[in-house]
Image: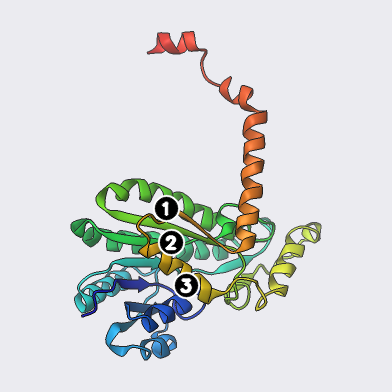
């Protein structure tokens, strides 16, 4: 058996999951390659049949999650790295969006990720080792019109991941939050649904951004192959980042958001601090 890490990746039929699985297998890692339809990942397993296992997995199904984790641990002996990649998008202004569509997206993008994380943690805790990589989005830090519910799923992933990091880091388990901008995946193409309701008042906000995202599908500046290498490098690092931004647009938008936050915090600091009891009353309460 190879001494290289055992990776478990969700959502490998397209996008980041597919390119990451391909990169890892070419470089001799052992990989549990998963997708809702295992026939779509047979070509990946064929790259290194001795180092790969194909598993049908819907991350919204807890029974399938338990079976997939058990199969991987039985086959490879352990899971060193979990990559929570499975997810999809949804386009629509907040008012236009269908609640059931939004809830379905939350089930995969957030609750599926949470369930997968909880499934691998017991063995990682026993070994006092492991890495959990959560694929979020720059849209989990900076919100954009027309994808508000998608943004909300990724904000949930970010908050969950930060709390998780603080809980498991003392146990030897690392957490990496990957926040890409636009990459040449299917996310802006067939992997995202559209709201059927259209409201004219959002034509200059939500609709404009949706059209821009759809319009550059297939021509985004981000390269999934380079992203796969960046994720591997972060996992192998002695001191990995918690926030791993990928893409120039991600870095640019994050820096703009940080400046906006600082401006708000500083401008309203007096009001913010004034919401506490005066120090004398606080001392009496203690």
Which residue corresponds to mark 1?
161
Which residue corresponds to mark 2?
134
Percent across and percent down for residue 244 are 49, 58
The secondary structure type at the circle numbered 1 is helix
Please state if 166 lies on the left or on the right of 150 as rendered: left
Please state if 3 lies on the left or on the right of 236 as rendered: left
The secondary structure type at the circle numbered 3 is helix
Residue 84 seen in render: no
Check if mark 2's residue and mark 1's residue have beta carbons within 8 Å: yes
In this view, the mark in front (2 or 3):
3
Compared to residue 53, the image places residue 116 above or below, namely above
* Label 2, label 3: how far apart the Cα atoms are: 13 Å
Which residue corresponds to mark 3?
228
- Image quadrant assignment for residue 80: bottom left
Compared to residue 91, the image places residue 29 above or below, namely below
Residue at the spot 38% in from the left edge and 56% down from the top edge: 175
Residue at the spot 64% in from the left edge and 30% down from the top edge: 266
* Label 2, label 1: how far apart the Cα atoms are: 7 Å
Work out whether residue 26 or residue 127 is closer to the camera in this orientation and state it: 26
Which callout, 2 or 1, points at the residue further toward the start of the chain?
A: 2
In this view, the mark in front (3 or 1):
3
* Label 3, label 1: how far apart the Cα atoms are: 20 Å
Residue 189 seen in render: yes
Please state if 45 lies on the left or on the right of 189 as rendered: left
């Amino acid at each position: 058996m190879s001494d290289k890490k055992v990776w478990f990746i969700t959502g490998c039929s397209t996008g980041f999951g597919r390119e990451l699985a391909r990169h890892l297998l070419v470089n001799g890692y052992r990989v549990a390659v998963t997708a809702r339809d295992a026939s779509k990942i047979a070509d990946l397993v064929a790259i290194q049949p001795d180092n790969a296992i194909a598993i049908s997995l819907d991350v919204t199904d807890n029974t399938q999650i338990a079976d997939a984790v058990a199969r991987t641990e039985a086959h490879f002996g352990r899971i060193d790295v979990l990559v929570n990649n499975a997810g999809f998008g949804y386009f629509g202004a907040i008012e236009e969006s269908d609640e059931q569509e939004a809830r379905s997206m939350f089930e995969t993008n957030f609750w599926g990720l949470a369930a997968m994380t909880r499934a691998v943690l017991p063995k990682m805790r026993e070994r006092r080792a492991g890495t959990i990589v959560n694929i979020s989005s720059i849209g989990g830090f900076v919100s954009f019109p027309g994808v508000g519910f998608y943004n909300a799923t990724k904000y949930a992933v970010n908050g969950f991941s930060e709390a998780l990091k603080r809980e498991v880091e003392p146990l030897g388990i690392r957490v990496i939050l990957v926040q890409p901008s636009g990459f040449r995946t299917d996310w802006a193409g067939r992997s995202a649904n559209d709201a059927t309701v259209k409201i004219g008042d959002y034509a200059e906000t939500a609709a404009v951004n949706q059209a821009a995202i759809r319009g550059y599908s297939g021509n985004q500046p981000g390269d999934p192959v380079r992203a796969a290498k960046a994720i591997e490098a972060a996992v192998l690092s002695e001191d990995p980042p918690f926030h791993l931004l990928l893409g120039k647009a991600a870095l640019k938008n994050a820096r703009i958001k940080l400046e906006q936050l600082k401006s708000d915090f500083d401008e309203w600091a007096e009001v913010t601090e004034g919401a506490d009891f005066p120090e004398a009353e606080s001392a009496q309460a203690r």
